Amino acid sequence: MQKMTAINTIFVEKGKGEEITSRFLKAKAVHTFEGFIRMEVLLGEEVEDRDEVKVCTTWEDRKYFDSWLHSRENAKSHDAKAPSAEKSPILGNELTIFDVKVQHLPAETERAK
């Protein structure tokens, strides 16, 4: 098995990044999927014309991520949109996949293994 991390970069209207990151405060279905290790949501505000939200999920193996990606739960989570009267602040997104080649944990965690 090869750990992997998927990073979904969401491009958001400038100043709306906090609004989007708040949607991830409560754990949802992805956290219950087999092979899921962790999720991190990062907010980058350094781009001049937009905010960037990076949703990083790490999985025990690519097959678990693929199972999540093609699941009904994933489709349902992306169908939940802002009220139709409101224009979405999301401009687009880009998914990037990485194999985890090296991982260092805190020293105490390493000793406990």
Image (cartoon, grey):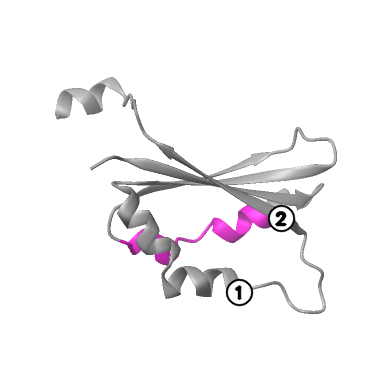
Q: How many marks?
A: 2
Figure check: 72 above or below 111: below
- Between the C-alphas of marks 2 and 1, the distance is 16 Å
Q: Residue at x 41, y 70 (%)?
A: 71
Q: Is 57 in the magenta?
A: no
Query: What amino acid is found at the position of numbered circle 1 in the picture?
Result: Ala
The relative height of residue 41 versus residue 101 in the rendered view (above or below) is below
Location of the N terminus (image quadrant): top left
Q: Earlier in the sequence, mark 2 or mark 1?
A: 1
Magenta span of residues: 19-33
The picture places residue 3, in percent across and down from the top left corner, at 31, 40
Crowd band around label 1 with a 10 angstrom C-alpha radius: few (<14), some (14–19), many (20+):
few
Q: Quadrant of the C terminus?
A: top left
Seen as rendered, the residue at the extreme left is 113
**Residue drawn where x is 33% and y is 63% of the image:** 32
Mark 2 vs mark 1, foreground winner is 2
Residue 43 sits in which quadrant? top right
Secondary structure beneath label 2: strand
Give the side of residue 113 with respect to residue 21, left or right.
left
Q: Which mark is residue 92?
A: 2
Residue 76 lies left or right of residue 83; in this view the side is: left
Task: Give the x, y percent position of residue 42.
Answer: 59, 41
Q: Secondary structure at mark 1?
A: loop
Q: Decide if residue 13 is on the left or right side of residue 21.
A: right
Residue 80, numbered label: 1
**Kind of residue indicated by mark 2:** Gly
Q: Residue at x 77, y 59 (%)?
A: 89
- Please name the residue shown 44% across and 72% down the image: 73
The residue nearer to you, when weighing 16 against 48, is 48
Residue 107 picture location, percent across and down = 27, 20
